[in-house]
Image: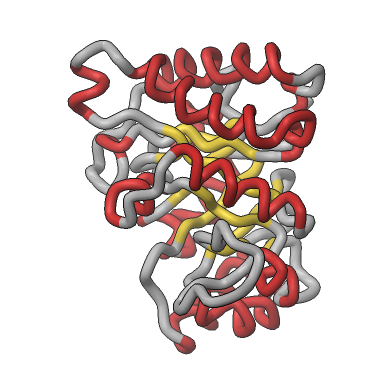
Amino acid sequence: MRKKLIAGNWKMNGSLAANEALVAALRAGMGNAQCLVAVCVPAPYLAQVQQLVAGSAIDLGAQDVSQHESGAFTGEFSAGMLRDFGVRYCLVGHSERRQYHSETDVVVATKAQRALAAGITPIVCVGETLAEREAGRTEEVVKRQMAAVIHANGHCISEIVVAYEPVWAIGTGKTATPEQAQQVHAVLRSQLHAATEQAERMLILYGGSMNAANASQLLGQADIDGGLIGGASLKAPDFLTIIAAAG
Ligand code: PGA
């Protein structure tokens, strides 16, 4: 039985005061959560949130990492630096990075490698655009994105977390139906089976307008092992409802 992971992706939101209030509300409301819980916060707040989650069941996550180990890469931060702040998870290849920062499949795969080498679990995001879905290319696209990460990471692939995030569902209020999501999750799981004997214990999260109302149905699917939550992770009651639904 896979333990589910509910990870919040705060994106570029928050402030010292707002973060403090949000984490305090999560800590107060979590009770004995049965699932794994993480918050992926903006880099400038890693040190703050490391302190805020200390001693709780909430793990710290980052939203990106450099593909390089160190050196003259102004504005970037390395996996080793993230590790210094107790970072446990790091998003890589989020569609907003692929789209607005031109991250290719190869760059995403290298970032996953950097995270793994530093002892951080990369949450590798894959997903098709609306145009790709409408053209019947969903499987082809997610398998291509996944294949690059499998190729670069060899047997370490079993140490990653995958997040299926259809681009058309992110921040739009349009969620994939549980059946649509499960179908893609099953495709990804079978691709992982071909790459590792550990595929059955690997986590494949769903992301894209998951919220307090639709979480339990999505999380009830056989191959949906948790959620990557954007908007709803900024509201403590909603995020707590999703955590409870994963229990
Ligand atoms: P959303 O974002 O829940 O706001 O759709 C999910 C994500 O981008 O990770």
Query: Compared with residue 31, is residue 78 higher up or lower down, i.e. above or below?
Result: below
- The answer to whether 228 appears left or right of 1 in the picture is left
**Above-or-below relation of 105 to 181:** below
Instruction: Check the image and name the residue furthest to the bottom.
Output: 17
Q: In the image, residue 202 lies at what x, y percent? A: 71, 29
Which residue is found at the position 44% from the left and 54% from the top? 238
Residue at (50%, 79%) from the top-left corner?
Answer: 19
Q: Quadrant of residue 10?
A: bottom left
The N terminus is located in which quarter?
top right
Residue 99: image x %, image y %? 29, 48
Q: Nearer the viewer, residue 98 or 16?
A: 98
Can residue 27 be spotted in the picture? no
Task: State the residue at coordinates (68%, 74%).
Answer: 81
Residue drawn where x is 80% and y is 73% of the image:
55
Q: Nearer the viewer, residue 67 or 164?
A: 67
- Near-viewer residue (146 or 130): 146
Residue 161 located left or right of residue 142: right
Number of numbered discs visible in the structure rendering: 0
- Name the side, left or right, on which 59 lies relative to 45: right
Location of residue 62 in the rendering, given as x and y in whole percent from the top left corner: 57, 63
Q: Give the image location of residue 119, x and y in percent.
A: 78, 56
Q: Say which quadrant the C terminus sits in.
A: top right
